[in-house]
Protein backbone atom coordinates (compact mmCIF):
# COMPACT_ATOMS: atom_id res chain seq x y z
CA UNK A 1 0.00 0.00 0.00
CA UNK A 2 1.19 3.50 -0.81
CA UNK A 3 2.17 5.93 1.92
CA UNK A 4 1.66 9.65 2.22
CA UNK A 5 5.02 11.29 2.77
CA UNK A 6 4.94 14.45 4.88
CA UNK A 7 7.87 16.83 5.39
CA UNK A 8 8.17 18.40 8.82
CA UNK A 9 10.76 20.83 10.15
CA UNK A 10 13.62 18.88 11.71
CA UNK A 11 14.17 21.20 14.63
CA UNK A 12 12.78 24.66 15.13
CA UNK A 13 9.66 26.59 15.95
CA UNK A 14 7.34 24.38 13.90
CA UNK A 15 8.63 20.95 14.87
CA UNK A 16 7.03 20.23 18.19
CA UNK A 17 3.56 21.57 17.38
CA UNK A 18 3.53 19.75 14.05
CA UNK A 19 4.37 16.43 15.71
CA UNK A 20 1.79 17.13 18.45
CA UNK A 21 -0.84 17.72 15.79
CA UNK A 22 -0.10 14.35 14.18
CA UNK A 23 -0.23 12.71 17.59
CA UNK A 24 -3.61 14.23 18.38
CA UNK A 25 -4.80 13.02 15.00
CA UNK A 26 -4.05 9.51 16.25
CA UNK A 27 -0.81 9.04 14.36
CA UNK A 28 1.90 7.23 16.32
CA UNK A 29 5.39 7.46 14.92
CA UNK A 30 7.77 4.58 15.41
CA UNK A 31 10.83 6.57 16.41
CA UNK A 32 11.92 9.93 17.76
CA UNK A 33 11.84 13.20 15.89
CA UNK A 34 15.61 13.51 15.60
CA UNK A 35 15.86 10.85 12.90
CA UNK A 36 15.82 11.61 9.20
CA UNK A 37 12.53 9.80 8.74
CA UNK A 38 9.95 7.85 10.68
CA UNK A 39 6.88 5.78 9.88
CA UNK A 40 3.41 5.83 11.36
CA UNK A 41 2.26 2.60 12.94
CA UNK A 42 -1.42 2.45 12.08
CA UNK A 43 -1.78 4.99 9.30
CA UNK A 44 -0.16 4.94 5.83
CA UNK A 45 2.15 7.86 6.51
CA UNK A 46 5.86 8.49 6.54
CA UNK A 47 7.55 11.60 7.98
CA UNK A 48 10.76 13.09 6.64
CA UNK A 49 12.52 15.79 8.66
CA UNK A 50 13.97 18.77 6.78
CA UNK A 51 14.98 22.40 7.19
CA UNK A 52 11.87 24.52 6.77
CA UNK A 53 13.45 26.50 3.89
CA UNK A 54 13.78 23.29 1.85
CA UNK A 55 10.24 22.00 2.36
CA UNK A 56 8.38 23.94 -0.42
CA UNK A 57 10.87 22.75 -3.05
CA UNK A 58 10.81 19.13 -1.87
CA UNK A 59 7.01 19.17 -2.04
CA UNK A 60 7.07 20.77 -5.48
CA UNK A 61 9.51 18.11 -6.72
CA UNK A 62 7.43 15.29 -5.23
CA UNK A 63 10.13 14.11 -2.79
CA UNK A 64 7.47 14.73 -0.14
CA UNK A 65 3.76 14.73 -1.04
CA UNK A 66 2.88 17.36 1.55
CA UNK A 67 4.68 19.48 4.11
CA UNK A 68 4.11 21.77 7.07
CA UNK A 69 5.74 25.19 6.78
CA UNK A 70 5.23 28.77 7.85
CA UNK A 71 3.03 30.58 5.33
CA UNK A 72 5.95 33.05 4.95
CA UNK A 73 8.16 30.27 3.53
CA UNK A 74 5.36 29.12 1.24
CA UNK A 75 4.95 32.63 -0.20
CA UNK A 76 8.67 33.46 -0.31
CA UNK A 77 9.76 30.28 -2.07
CA UNK A 78 7.02 30.71 -4.69
CA UNK A 79 7.05 27.00 -5.56
CA UNK A 80 4.39 25.13 -7.51
CA UNK A 81 2.55 23.78 -4.45
CA UNK A 82 -0.99 24.18 -3.10
CA UNK A 83 -1.93 25.69 0.25
CA UNK A 84 -4.18 22.93 1.59
CA UNK A 85 -4.93 23.85 5.21
CA UNK A 86 -4.18 26.63 7.69
CA UNK A 87 -3.17 25.21 11.05
CA UNK A 88 -3.43 28.21 13.38
CA UNK A 89 -0.12 27.84 15.25
CA UNK A 90 3.31 29.53 14.94
CA UNK A 91 1.55 32.78 14.15
CA UNK A 92 3.75 35.74 13.33
CA UNK A 93 3.90 38.75 11.04
CA UNK A 94 6.43 40.02 8.52
CA UNK A 95 7.15 43.64 9.23
CA UNK A 96 9.38 46.55 8.36
CA UNK A 97 11.18 48.10 11.32
CA UNK A 98 13.32 51.22 11.55
CA UNK A 99 15.56 52.62 14.34
CA UNK A 100 13.26 53.82 17.09
CA UNK A 101 14.76 57.30 17.09
CA UNK A 102 13.81 57.77 13.44
CA UNK A 103 10.72 59.76 12.55
CA UNK A 104 8.45 57.72 10.37
CA UNK A 105 5.60 59.32 8.47
CA UNK A 106 4.50 56.43 6.25
CA UNK A 107 5.63 53.98 3.62
CA UNK A 108 6.94 56.74 1.29
CA UNK A 109 9.70 57.41 3.85
CA UNK A 110 11.28 54.12 2.77
CA UNK A 111 12.04 55.52 -0.70
CA UNK A 112 15.73 55.01 -1.51
CA UNK A 113 16.44 53.26 1.81
CA UNK A 114 18.47 50.08 2.26
CA UNK A 115 16.31 47.34 3.77
CA UNK A 116 17.89 44.11 5.08
CA UNK A 117 15.86 40.91 4.95
CA UNK A 118 15.79 37.14 4.46
CA UNK A 119 12.45 37.50 2.65
CA UNK A 120 13.29 39.50 -0.49
CA UNK A 121 10.35 38.32 -2.59
CA UNK A 122 7.68 39.25 -0.05
CA UNK A 123 9.41 42.57 0.63
CA UNK A 124 9.72 43.46 -3.07
CA UNK A 125 6.03 42.71 -3.61
CA UNK A 126 5.11 44.91 -0.66
CA UNK A 127 7.29 47.78 -1.90
CA UNK A 128 5.94 47.46 -5.46
CA UNK A 129 2.35 47.45 -4.19
CA UNK A 130 3.07 50.70 -2.35
CA UNK A 131 4.96 52.28 -5.24
CA UNK A 132 8.18 52.58 -3.23
CA UNK A 133 11.67 52.04 -4.64
CA UNK A 134 14.17 50.84 -2.06
CA UNK A 135 17.33 48.71 -2.07
CA UNK A 136 16.72 45.19 -0.84
CA UNK A 137 19.71 43.61 0.89
CA UNK A 138 19.45 39.88 1.41
CA UNK A 139 21.02 38.56 4.62
CA UNK A 140 20.37 35.10 5.92
CA UNK A 141 20.49 35.61 9.68
CA UNK A 142 20.51 38.23 12.46
CA UNK A 143 18.75 40.70 10.20
CA UNK A 144 17.88 42.82 13.23
CA UNK A 145 21.55 43.82 13.58
CA UNK A 146 21.57 45.50 10.14
CA UNK A 147 20.88 49.10 11.20
CA UNK A 148 23.26 49.10 14.18
CA UNK A 149 26.04 47.66 11.99
CA UNK A 150 25.40 50.43 9.50
CA UNK A 151 24.61 48.06 6.64
CA UNK A 152 20.89 48.91 6.45
CA UNK A 153 18.49 51.75 7.23
CA UNK A 154 15.59 49.42 7.95
CA UNK A 155 14.86 45.71 8.26
CA UNK A 156 12.09 43.42 7.10
CA UNK A 157 11.75 40.35 9.31
CA UNK A 158 9.49 38.04 11.27
CA UNK A 159 7.98 39.58 14.39
CA UNK A 160 6.14 37.68 17.06
CA UNK A 161 6.20 39.34 20.51
CA UNK A 162 8.23 42.31 19.25
CA UNK A 163 10.88 41.96 21.95
CA UNK A 164 13.73 41.26 19.48
CA UNK A 165 13.00 44.58 17.77
CA UNK A 166 12.88 46.46 21.07
CA UNK A 167 16.14 44.99 22.33
CA UNK A 168 17.82 46.07 19.08
CA UNK A 169 16.52 49.64 19.29
CA UNK A 170 14.03 49.19 16.43
CA UNK A 171 10.32 49.93 16.01
CA UNK A 172 7.81 48.13 13.81
CA UNK A 173 6.33 50.51 11.23
CA UNK A 174 4.65 48.37 8.54
CA UNK A 175 3.11 44.90 8.58
CA UNK A 176 3.38 43.32 5.11
CA UNK A 177 1.85 39.92 5.86
CA UNK A 178 0.57 37.68 8.63
CA UNK A 179 1.64 34.07 8.76
CA UNK A 180 0.75 30.80 10.46
CA UNK A 181 1.75 27.17 9.97
CA UNK A 182 0.14 25.70 6.85
CA UNK A 183 -0.03 22.38 5.04
CA UNK A 184 1.23 22.59 1.48
CA UNK A 185 0.71 19.83 -1.06
CA UNK A 186 2.10 18.79 -4.41
CA UNK A 187 -0.64 19.67 -6.94
CA UNK A 188 -0.30 16.42 -8.92
CA UNK A 189 -0.81 13.75 -6.24
CA UNK A 190 -1.97 10.37 -7.45
CA UNK A 191 -5.51 9.47 -6.41
CA UNK A 192 -4.46 6.90 -3.82
CA UNK A 193 -2.18 9.41 -2.07
CA UNK A 194 -4.87 12.12 -2.36
CA UNK A 195 -7.29 9.78 -0.56
CA UNK A 196 -4.80 9.30 2.32
CA UNK A 197 -4.33 13.08 2.46
CA UNK A 198 -8.11 13.57 2.68
CA UNK A 199 -8.25 11.08 5.59
CA UNK A 200 -5.44 12.94 7.34
CA UNK A 201 -7.12 16.33 6.77
CA UNK A 202 -10.39 14.95 8.14
CA UNK A 203 -8.60 14.00 11.36
CA UNK A 204 -6.67 17.27 11.57
CA UNK A 205 -9.84 19.33 11.13
CA UNK A 206 -11.50 17.35 13.94
CA UNK A 207 -8.55 18.13 16.21
CA UNK A 208 -8.57 21.82 15.31
CA UNK A 209 -12.35 22.19 15.69
CA UNK A 210 -12.15 20.52 19.11
CA UNK A 211 -9.48 22.93 20.28
CA UNK A 212 -11.60 25.96 19.40
CA UNK A 213 -14.87 24.66 20.92
CA UNK A 214 -16.14 23.73 24.38
CA UNK A 215 -18.93 21.45 25.46
CA UNK A 216 -21.35 23.19 27.81
CA UNK A 217 -23.95 21.74 30.19
CA UNK A 218 -26.34 23.82 32.28
CA UNK A 219 -29.59 23.75 34.17
CA UNK A 220 -32.38 26.05 33.06
CA UNK A 221 -35.78 26.87 34.57
CA UNK A 222 -38.33 25.90 31.90
CA UNK A 223 -39.84 29.40 31.78
CA UNK A 224 -36.41 30.79 30.78
CA UNK A 225 -35.61 28.02 28.33
CA UNK A 226 -36.50 29.98 25.23
CA UNK A 227 -34.08 32.86 26.03
CA UNK A 228 -31.32 30.46 26.99
CA UNK A 229 -31.64 28.32 23.86
CA UNK A 230 -31.48 31.46 21.73
CA UNK A 231 -27.95 32.02 23.08
CA UNK A 232 -26.71 28.51 22.26
CA UNK A 233 -26.09 27.47 18.67
CA UNK A 234 -25.03 23.84 19.27
CA UNK A 235 -23.76 21.69 16.43
CA UNK A 236 -27.21 21.24 14.96
CA UNK A 237 -29.26 22.58 17.87
CA UNK A 238 -28.90 22.24 21.66
CA UNK A 239 -30.03 19.07 23.45
CA UNK A 240 -32.73 19.61 26.10
CA UNK A 241 -33.51 16.91 28.72
CA UNK A 242 -35.88 17.15 31.68
CA UNK A 243 -34.33 17.25 35.16
CA UNK A 244 -35.75 15.07 37.96
CA UNK A 245 -36.92 18.29 39.60
CA UNK A 246 -40.16 19.54 38.05
CA UNK A 247 -39.90 22.76 36.00
CA UNK A 248 -36.18 22.43 35.16
CA UNK A 249 -34.26 21.19 32.17
CA UNK A 250 -30.67 20.23 31.43
CA UNK A 251 -29.28 21.87 28.31
CA UNK A 252 -26.23 20.57 26.40
CA UNK A 253 -24.50 22.44 23.64
CA UNK A 254 -21.20 23.36 21.96
CA UNK A 255 -19.69 26.84 22.14
CA UNK A 256 -16.95 28.55 20.18
CA UNK A 257 -14.01 29.46 22.39
CA UNK A 258 -13.93 33.01 20.94
CA UNK A 259 -17.45 33.94 22.04
CA UNK A 260 -17.25 31.86 25.17
CA UNK A 261 -17.14 34.37 28.08
CA UNK A 262 -19.63 36.68 26.46
CA UNK A 263 -22.17 33.87 26.09
CA UNK A 264 -21.55 32.57 29.63
CA UNK A 265 -22.35 36.02 31.06
CA UNK A 266 -25.54 36.23 29.03
CA UNK A 267 -26.55 32.70 30.07
CA UNK A 268 -26.17 33.60 33.75
CA UNK A 269 -28.20 36.77 33.26
CA UNK A 270 -30.90 34.70 31.57
CA UNK A 271 -31.22 32.40 34.61
CA UNK A 272 -28.95 29.47 33.74
CA UNK A 273 -27.47 27.64 36.74
CA UNK A 274 -24.90 24.92 37.40
CA UNK A 275 -22.97 25.70 34.24
CA UNK A 276 -20.32 23.08 33.40
CA UNK A 277 -17.78 23.58 30.64
CA UNK A 278 -15.90 20.57 29.30
CA UNK A 279 -13.06 20.36 26.76
CA UNK A 280 -13.83 18.44 23.60
CA UNK A 281 -11.41 15.72 22.60
CA UNK A 282 -12.33 15.52 18.89
CA UNK A 283 -15.10 17.20 16.94
CA UNK A 284 -16.40 15.71 13.70
CA UNK A 285 -18.26 18.39 11.77
O1 LIG B 1 16.62 25.45 10.82
P1 LIG B 1 15.45 25.84 10.00
O2 LIG B 1 15.81 26.54 8.71
O3 LIG B 1 14.51 24.67 9.80
O4 LIG B 1 14.60 26.86 10.90
P2 LIG B 1 14.56 28.46 10.90
O5 LIG B 1 15.54 28.93 11.92
O6 LIG B 1 14.64 29.02 9.53
O7 LIG B 1 13.07 28.73 11.36
P3 LIG B 1 12.43 28.87 12.81
O8 LIG B 1 12.36 27.54 13.47
O9 LIG B 1 13.04 30.01 13.55
O10 LIG B 1 10.96 29.35 12.37
C1 LIG B 1 10.13 28.53 11.61
C2 LIG B 1 8.86 29.30 11.31
O11 LIG B 1 8.20 29.69 12.52
C3 LIG B 1 9.02 30.62 10.56
O12 LIG B 1 9.17 30.46 9.17
C4 LIG B 1 7.73 31.36 10.90
O13 LIG B 1 6.70 30.95 10.04
C5 LIG B 1 7.39 30.83 12.32
N1 LIG B 1 7.66 31.80 13.41
C6 LIG B 1 6.75 32.18 14.34
C7 LIG B 1 8.81 32.45 13.68
C8 LIG B 1 8.57 33.25 14.80
N2 LIG B 1 7.28 33.06 15.19
C9 LIG B 1 9.65 34.09 15.31
N3 LIG B 1 9.43 34.79 16.30
N4 LIG B 1 10.02 32.43 13.08
C10 LIG B 1 11.02 33.19 13.56
N5 LIG B 1 10.88 34.02 14.64
C11 LIG B 1 12.12 34.81 15.03
C12 LIG B 1 12.33 36.04 14.14
O14 LIG B 1 13.14 35.71 13.03
C13 LIG B 1 13.03 37.03 15.05
O15 LIG B 1 14.43 36.79 15.09
O16 LIG B 1 12.03 35.32 16.33
C14 LIG B 1 12.47 36.67 16.39
C15 LIG B 1 11.33 37.61 16.70
O17 LIG B 1 10.59 37.14 17.76
P4 LIG B 1 9.99 38.18 18.82
O18 LIG B 1 9.06 37.36 19.65
O19 LIG B 1 11.12 38.74 19.59
O20 LIG B 1 9.24 39.26 18.04
ZN1 LIG C 1 14.83 28.06 7.87
Image (tube, rainbow, N blue to C red):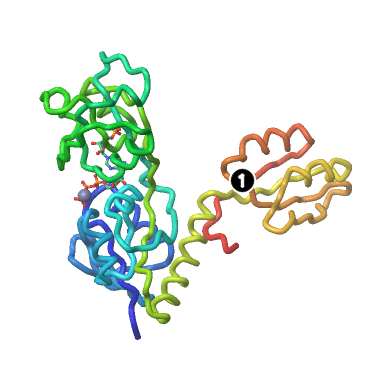
Residue 141 percent coordinates (x, y): 15, 40
Instruction: Tell me what residue is drawn at x 81 percent, y 52 percent.
Output: 243
Location of mark 1 (residue): 277
Instruction: Tell me what residue is drawn at x 57 percent, y 64 percent.
Output: 284
Which residue reaches farthest bottom? Answer: 1
Residue 114 percent coordinates (x, y): 19, 29
Q: Relative to 242, is 142 above or below? A: above
The answer to which image quadrant residue 159 occupies is top left
Looking at the rendered structure, the secondary structure element under dot 1 is strand
Q: Is residue 71 left or right of residue 212?
A: left
Quadrant position of the N terminus in the picture: bottom left
Residue 138 percent coordinates (x, y): 17, 40
Residue 268 percent coordinates (x, y): 73, 34
The foreground one among 142 and 223 is 142
Quadrant position of the C terminus in the picture: bottom right
Displayed-image quarter of ligand 1: top left
The foreground one among 154 and 212 is 154
The answer to which image quadrant residue 221 occupies is top right
Amino acid sequence: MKKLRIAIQKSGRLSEKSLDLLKEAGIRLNNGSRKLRSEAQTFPLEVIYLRDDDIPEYVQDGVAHIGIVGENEFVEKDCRVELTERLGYSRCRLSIAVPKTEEYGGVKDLEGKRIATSYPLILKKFLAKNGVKAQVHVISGSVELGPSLGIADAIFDIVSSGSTLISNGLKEVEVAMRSEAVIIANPDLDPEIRKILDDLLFRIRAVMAASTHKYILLNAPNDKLKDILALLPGMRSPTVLPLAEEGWSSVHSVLKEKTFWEVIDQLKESGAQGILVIPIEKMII
